[in-house]
Amino acid sequence: MRAWVFGDDVDTDAMVPGRYMKLGIEEIVRHCLESVDPGFASSVKPSDIVVGGRNFGTGSSREQAPEALKYLGVAALVAESFAGLFYRNAFNLGLPAIVCAQAKRIRAGDLLKIDFEGRIENLTTGETLSCERIPPHLLQLVRDGGLLAQLEKRLRCGTISS
Amino acid sequence: MRAWVFGDDVDTDAMVPGRYMKLGIEEIVRHCLESVDPGFASSVKPSDIVVGGRNFGTGSSREQAPEALKYLGVAALVAESFAGLFYRNAFNLGLPAIVCAQAKRIRAGDLLKIDFEGRIENLTTGETLSCERIPPHLLQLVRDGGLLAQLEKRLRCGTISS
């Protein structure tokens, strides 16, 4: 629930640097975001939240970018805006991305509580930030643990049929 | 293939104005983007291309926004960046959204040729613009006509099974 705060236009290459892409995910994530915050990968804790500015996740189409954040235990992403493909990949992996016009009001280390219904409570400052609600079908995708898990569940339950 | 050019932060409410949402799609699309270009809905032709600036498709989560553009025959969207949810919905409907850092070089009425492999040819000016490649799985989604059509096809072919 603790915020890690980054700026505008943080790209997927910063999340999963190209020179480590041939290595496995365990090695790749050790370098996640090191070019903008060398301490991030070693210090981020499960349930922490990554906060960005505008166009978070821009750049190449590497699906490993949200995967790396998820692998490190990041519970949610908050940003003024997300790059479209990164946003898509994040939800497909079950990692919620929340658009918040007031994201820049969050400081590094703030304790956040996100309700997914359009509000972020900053428990450190006492402030409530309004953000876009996640549509129900995407929230369900997060609850199901991503697209593959959701498809498996639906096929098992017979709610998708030919 | 003719470009309709819009600015930054064009939101989904401009594409499908709230006050017409209770009407059917045929009526809604008559008002598509009228607040920014009153002539758009009546003059756009099948295969035309809509070009935006930054954060195209921001705002509410209305899935009808890309649906309206598709209904009007728009073949592709090009923008400096797209709002994440709009980008997701566009591809799910089979409408390709192409991120092009040089989108502002395109003028209204320019004839464009898009190869989906990272290039846009401007046949009017002779210029070639570089853009992000659409990842293969999203290109397939466009070729299949969107997510529902793709799922139906895969289920029919047995490439998804429980």
Image: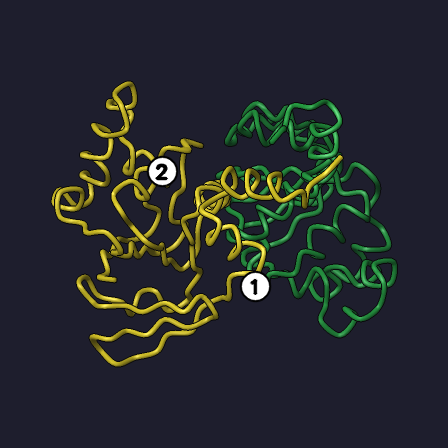
Chain colours: A green, B yellow
Give residue A146's position: percent from left, percent from top. Answer: 70, 38
- Output the chain of dot 2: B
The residue indicated by pointer 2 is B67
Q: Residue at 74% x, 51% y: name it.
A: A67
Instruction: Determine whether A151 is above or below B97 in the image.
Output: above
- Residue B160: quadrant of the picture: top right
The residue lying furthest to the bottom in this view is B126
Give residue A53's position: percent from left, percent from top. Answer: 55, 50
Q: Residue at 41% x, 65% y: name it.
A: B100
* Residue B16 relative to residue A121: left or right: left
The residue lying furthest to the top in this view is B22
Q: In front: B68, or B46?
A: B46
Cα–Cα gap, marks 2 and 1 = 26 Å
Label 2 sits on what residue type? Glu
Quarter of the image that includes the C terminus of chain A: top right
Which numbered tag is attached to residue A59?
Answer: 1
Q: Are marks 2 and 1 in contact (CB under 8 Å)?
A: no
Q: Is residue B127 visible in the rendered structure shown here?
A: yes
Q: Residue at 73% x, 33% y: name it.
A: A111
Which numbered tag is attached to residue B37?
Answer: none
Q: In front: A111, or A117?
A: A117
Give residue B47's position: percent from left, percent from top. Answer: 27, 56
Instruction: Determine whether B141 is above or below A2 in the image.
Output: below
Quarter of the image that includes the N terminus of chain A: top right
- Residue A14: quadrant of the picture: bottom right
